[in-house]
Amino acid sequence: MGKHKAIRLLMVATVLFIQITFLTRIVREHYETNAFIVIAALLVIISIVFGYKYLDLHHEDYAYEKISIVIWVPIGALICYLLNINGGLGSILSMGIVGTIASFLPLLNKKSNYLKQIPASIYCGAFVGMSSVETSPSIGFVLAAGTLAGLYFMISKNLFLGVGGKLGTMAFAGVITATLIYWIVI
């Protein structure tokens, strides 16, 4: 198996694992009956697996986002977190401010392809910065989660095409991975 195919498989498996785990935890938290949990979890898992297998969600070529674009993910996370926690604006308003400002960056130079690509990465980072202080206890944690989300953003350039929520999913994966590492280390 080639390096690119292995990275793609790892990325899809990671997102699939996170989705299944998260959805199973939701079902388990809201329903008392174990039989219902098993049936619901199996239905969710089957639908996700069939969705990944039979929907055309990926390009056949292997391309990765450039580091110069990905670096904006942790920056967006940090700005949103600072507005959210330190600025006291709340997660929704902070996200809206960061996303709106990022959307105007391409207007600085309409011919620049680089500026056209920055808003998506800042917006992905802003999803990380929306986390509550219980989830993201420090700026260091937010930068780590933003960096991991940036890594997922970089790898998933040609994955999950046409699927809504890709940026939020990459941010969620970054926060979940950072939380897992945080729990293991501390």
Image (cartoon, rainbow, N blue to C red):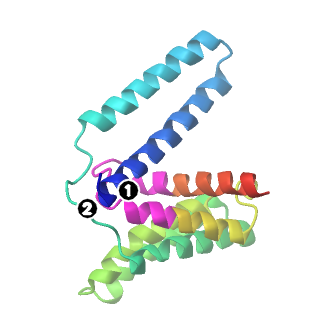
Residue 63 located left or right of residue 148:
left
Element carrying mark 2: loop
Q: Residues within 10 Å of mark 2 (few under 14, many from 20)?
A: some
| Residue occupying the far right of the picture | 186
Residue type at mark 2? Answer: Tyr
**Residue identifier under label 1:** 7
Q: Residue at x 30, y 89 (%)?
A: 109
The answer to whether mark 2 and mark 1 are in CB contact below 8 A is yes
The disc at residue 83 is none
Q: Residue at x 47, y 56 (%)?
A: 170
Element carrying mark 1: helix
User: Residue 63 occupies which quadrant of the picture?
Assistant: bottom left
User: Residue 139 occupies which quadrant of the picture?
Assistant: bottom right
Please provide percent x and percent y for residue 134: 76, 54
The disc at residue 62 is 2
Quarter placement of the C terminus: bottom right
User: Residue 91 occupies which quadrant of the picture?
Assistant: bottom right
Q: Residue at x 39, y 67 (%)?
A: 120
| Residue occupying the far left of the picture | 60
